[in-house]
Amino acid sequence: MTPAELSRTVLDAVCRAVDAGELDVVPPERVTLTEPGPGGCGDFATNVALRLARPAGRPPLHVADILRARLLDADGVRDVVVTGPGFLNISLHARDDLLTGLVREIRARGTEYGYGDALAGQTVVLRVPYEVRAEIVADAVARIIATQGGRAEIEHGEPVTLRPVPAPEDPAPLGPDAARWALLHPAPHDRPRITADHLVQREINPLFRIRYAHARVRALLRNADDLGFSAEPGELGFADHAGTADADYRGYARAGEPVSEAHFGGAPAEPRTPHPLQAPLLDHPRILRTAATAHAPDRLARHLLTVADALLPLLPEVLPVGEEKPGVAHRARLALAEAAGAVLAGGLSLLGIDAPEHL
C-alpha cells in the first residue's frame, strides 16, 4: 500500500463513520500522513482525529477510537494504535510491500513525486531586498510554492517579508550551482559561507554527495541496460535492511565491488527493519509542503542530503557480481535507487541546481 493509497483508506474510514452516523462532520478533502513521532509506533501516523474532534463535538480520543475500528477492517492495515491526545498510528502488513508500493509511486510520478495542493489557488507575495541571497532564496521559494499548487510573486520594497542574512561576499566565483547551494543550504538566519569548500569533489562536500549519488544512479541504470535487465520494484533480498545502514560509508567508492545475496549467508531472509531509504522517501512530500509554507528552501536542501546519505551505501549492491545473473533482488535495488535518484533530481531542480548524468 502506497502512502497515497493509505491516505485514501483513512479518508474512506472517515466517510464510512459519517455515513453510519458515528460522526457528524464534513469529511476533509485529504488526510495527511507523517512518520510516527515520539511515543508513536507503526509505519504512519495521522492527526485526522484531532482535526475532526471540534467540528464533531467529540473528544479527540473518542473520534480516534471510532476511526481505529474502521481502519482495522481495511485491507493492508495490520494494526492501529491510538497515542497521545488522539494520534492514529498505523502499521501495515509486510514492510517490504510498503517500500515496494512507495517505489512504484515515485517511479510513476518521477521528479514530481511529493507535489500537492497545500497552497492551491493561493498567491504568495515575497517582498525581498536588493541583495543576492534574498533573490536566490526567493527564486527557490517560488519554485517550491508551485509544487503545492500556489503561485509566488517576487517584489522589491517595504515591508520586506523575506530577508535572509546576506552573503558576506559575492558568491559568483563559485559558479552557479555551488553558489546557489552556499546560499540555500544554511537556514535564513545563518550567515552563508562563501568558500572553496563548496567546490571540493569529495565526501566532505554535501553538494558533491548529493550530485554524486544522482550521477551514480544514472550510471547504474546505463550499466544495467548493458547487462540486459531493468528496474522492477520488489523485495530487496537483504538479510537485514539495518545492515545496509551500518555499512562502511565509503562503500559507495568501491563501485566495482557490489555485494550479492551470498554475502548475507544464502537465501534472503524476511527484513526485520525498514530500509534506511524508506523514511526519507516517505517524508519527501511533507518536506516540500513545509518548505513551501515556511518559505524555507534550506529544509529541502538538508532533506536531499539525508536521502543521498541513505542511498550511497545501497549503490555498490545493485549490480550482479562476476558470473552472477541479474535476479529479482537486483531489479528491486535498481528500482529503489532510481526512485531515490528521481527525488534528488527533482529537489535539486527546485533549488535551481543541475543534477548531472555524469560526474
Image (cartoon, helix red, strand yellow):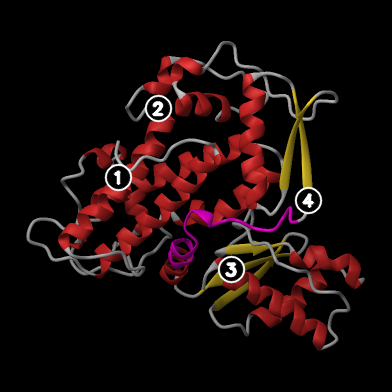
Q: Is residue 106 visible?
A: yes
Kindly indicate the quadrant of the structure image that contains residue 320: bottom left
What separation in Å lies between label 4 and label 1 (alpha carbons)? Answer: 38 Å
* Residue 216: numbered disc: 1
Q: Is residue 204 above or below residue 22?
A: above
Q: Read off the residue under disc 3.
A: 4
In this image, 166 relative to 48: left or right?
left
From the top left corner, tell me how far across and down residue 316 is, in percent: 24, 48
Residues at discs 4 and 1 in contact (Cβ within 8 Å): no
The residue nearer to you, when weighing 272 against 96, is 96
Q: Read off the residue under disc 2.
A: 205
- Provide the secondary structure element on which disc 4 rests: loop
- Residue in the picture at 85% in, 67% down: 53
Residues at discs 2 and 4 in contact (Cβ within 8 Å): no
Mark 2 neighbour density, 10 Å: few (under 14) some (14–19) many (20 or more) = few
* Residue 187: numbered disc: none
What separation in Å lies between label 2 and label 4 (alpha carbons)? Answer: 37 Å
Q: Callout 4, which amino acid?
A: Gln
- Provide the secondary structure element on which disc 2 rests: loop
Q: Is residue 276 visible?
A: no
Q: Earlier in the sequence, mark 4 or mark 1?
A: 4
Q: Earlier in the sequence, mark 3 or mark 4?
A: 3
Residue range (magenta): 103-120
Kindly indicate the quadrant of the structure image that contains residue 18: bottom right
Residues at discs 3 and 4 in contact (Cβ within 8 Å): no
From the top left corner, tell me how far across and down residue 131 is, in percent: 67, 18
Mark 1 neighbour density, 10 Å: few (under 14) some (14–19) many (20 or more) = many
Q: Callout 1, which amino acid?
A: Arg
